[in-house]
Image (tube, rainbow, N blue to C red):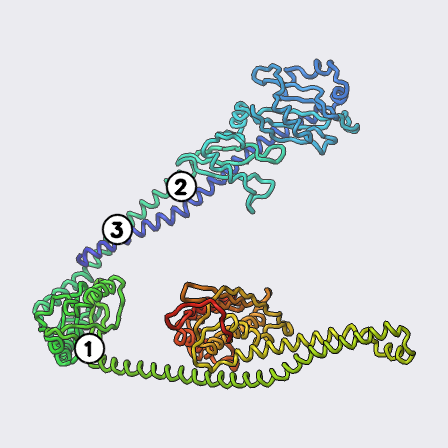
Amino acid sequence: MTLRLKALLIVGVTLVFLLITLYLSLSGIWLRGFAQIESQQAYLNVKRVTEALDNDLKELQSTAADWASWDETYQFVEEGNETYIQTNLEDAAIANLQLNVMVFIHRGGRIVYDQGLDLEEKVTVPVPDSLRQYLAANPRLFQNTNIASSLYGIVVLPENPLLLATHPILDSHQTAPSRGTLLVGRFLNTEQVQRISTLTHLAIAVYPFSLAQLPSDFQAVKNQLDRPPSNFHTPSEPQILIRLLSHERIAGYTLIKDIQGQPGLLLRVDIARDIYQRGQQGLRYLVAALLIVGVTFGMVTLWLLEKWVLLPLARFLATVKHIRSSGNLSERLLTPGNDELSRLGIAMNQLLATLQESQRQLRQSQERYQSVVDNVREVIFQTDAKGRWMFLNPAWTELTGFSIEESLGLPFWKFIHPEDRSYQREKFHRLIQEQVQDNRCEIRYQTKEGAGRIFEVHYRLRFATDGAIAGIAGTLNDISDRKLAEAREQAKTQQLEQTLRELTQTQAQLIQSEKMSSLGQLVAGVAHEINNPVSFVSGNLEHANHYFQQLLDLIDAYQQHYPNPPAAIQAQMEEIDFNFLARDLPRLLDSMQVGADRISEIVKSLRNFSRLDEAEVKRVDIHEGLDSNLMILQHKLKAQGQQAEIQIFKEYGNLPKVECYPGQLNQVFMNLLTNAIDALEEKRVTSNLAESPWIRIRTEVKDAHCVLIRIADNGTGMTETTTQRLFDPFFTTKPVGKGTGLGLSISYQIVLEKHKGQLLVNSELGIGTEFTIELPTSQSEGDISYGNMPTF
């Protein structure tokens, strides 16, 4: 598109835009004012109609006041004489008052007389039953005790809306008390609406608010008019809505409330839009004048542009085309004058000089780049969006043996190791789809001779000028030798780490075994030293009890043969309370015997536990080993301070003899029971254990060659992460100084390696933990005996 055409378009579009802007602005300002005047006139017309209705109501109120404040009416409502009816309530008299309804109500609530009148036929008709029902439902309308209690308003009846007024019946001087209420009404039927329309010279439509089938325009404004008035309406002003009915007419709507203040009637006043149409006509004249002025201004502007801008610019363009076609950057433009076009010519001459210098530098840069690409040891590559080689430098041939000519155009995965081709092809397509900007990976390529080489690949996406993905670009670096060296170093490192772990575990086991062996020797010595005195005490207690019984028998014999002993003996017996001694000493000896038996049981448990250094395999009773550990830990199970006693639930099955290392298995039981006690104590401290702490020991036969020992508690429990590391050496969840992290690790090795069994754990945080020991009944093939089982 030429500048001449662009100038024409710019001027034309500018004028059109200006005219449209002026039209929209003026129409918004101009027509808004006419619309406001129109709406204001519609608002005033609606008020005229509502005021006309209000005048009719006030007229009814005046009529009711004239008839109610009359001595004859005052007497009639009390006596109900026919003379008043014949004289004053003739059809012609009521028709002159333009009344459809007239009701005399006694102060007691009964209707003394009512009369209805058809104003068109001038004949008496019954008062509508709907009015009677309304009066019965709303007695306050005829409870007028004074003039101030008079009412007037609209009552919506099924037949027609009724303009209603009430007044208390008083004497002519209005001094006597009220004897009742006079009610007068006029139906707001079609004739009355037409009368008001003729009076106000306005088109009026009235519908009951509760009518189900309202016209669409009434239905649209019904809910809006029923809302509370906005801040712009005072309570005394009606709420009026203005709506467009068509291009020619506008309507005003208002809600007329009934005599009880509830929505009664919907009123619409239609008005012709003469004011607004005249405003539109004036706006069209103004726009036509602006169009003529704009076209004239545009033509003058185009002529000036042609003379002072377009012709010199055409000459400038011809010179530039000549330089472009010749390719001679040494030519220069003529720059007469001192305007913007002349300064553009000077800038173009400077640009030509700069381009001439840039071309020289570009040739030098290309030569340097080509030298680097040809001599670098890394492969520099580019692919298209389908993964085909688009560029490769000579290093490709040096590293793979494939020539550049035979490689270009082929997908890069054709040169990848066959085991990795499918994966790398899918990865490339995923990279293109997800638009991963850059990445690094290691890929196995295959040389022309079939050898595998590992290349470190650095690449990133290439984009075309339109923003679409053009492919990838990057480098390939042969790291095969480095990866081989890393693999060797990693293998050595793993071997050293494994050796270190084995040494650490062996050292821990030796330390723990030595500690337990020393402990076993100490316990065995203590048990031996205690056992002799306890046996002596226990044996002598039996003789002491026998001797004491013989002495008591002797004293009883003395008392039988000498019932009256000397006073000195009697005094001494009372002083030592002989009867109490005779009763209490047997109990004292019995408690001493119980204590001695308890010490014997503890010594027996210590002897069983002291066999930690036994190296031979024996068939033993698992239950006795468990009971021995419970006996040793009895002091930890009892209540201490705020800690409740730990309950022990034994659910022992009928187990066979188990072939095992008794001392080492005892060590496993001790570790598991101690951990359970510690977990219960921790839960009491940290979580305020509400339920009673317990430990459950359950044994059962899994099959003919295996038994299960389950030790469970309701302690703190453990997370899944903790249970996964529970049997690692030196791993502990206890505070520093309370645990070494070796107990469960050694127990695991004792069960797994020494006894070819399994040690399993099942735990839930906050619920508890259960350890399961699975032991073969025999360490070698043989029969399982259920006979008498030796003790630990």
* Circles 1 and 2 in contact, beta carbons < 8 Å: no
Q: Label 2 is placed on what type of residue?
A: Gly
Q: Which residue is mark 2?
A: 279
Q: CA distance from mark 2 to mark 3?
A: 27 Å
- Disc 1: which residue: 477
Q: Which residue is mark 3?
A: 296
Q: Is residue 666 above or below residue 762?
A: below
Residue 66: % across, % down: 70, 25
Is residue 533 among the parts visible in the rendering? yes
Residue 430 placement: quadrant: bottom left
Number of labels in the image equals 3
Question: In the depicted view, which residue is nearer to us: 681 or 256?
Answer: 681
474 over 537 or under it: above or below: above
Few, some or many C-alpha atoms within 10 Å of disc 3 (few <14, some 14-19, many ≥20)? few
Q: Earlier in the sequence, mark 1 or mark 2?
A: 2
Dot 1 crowding, Cα within 10 Å, few <14, some 14–19, many 20+: some
* Contact between labelled residues 3 and 2, with CB atoms less than 8 Å apart: no
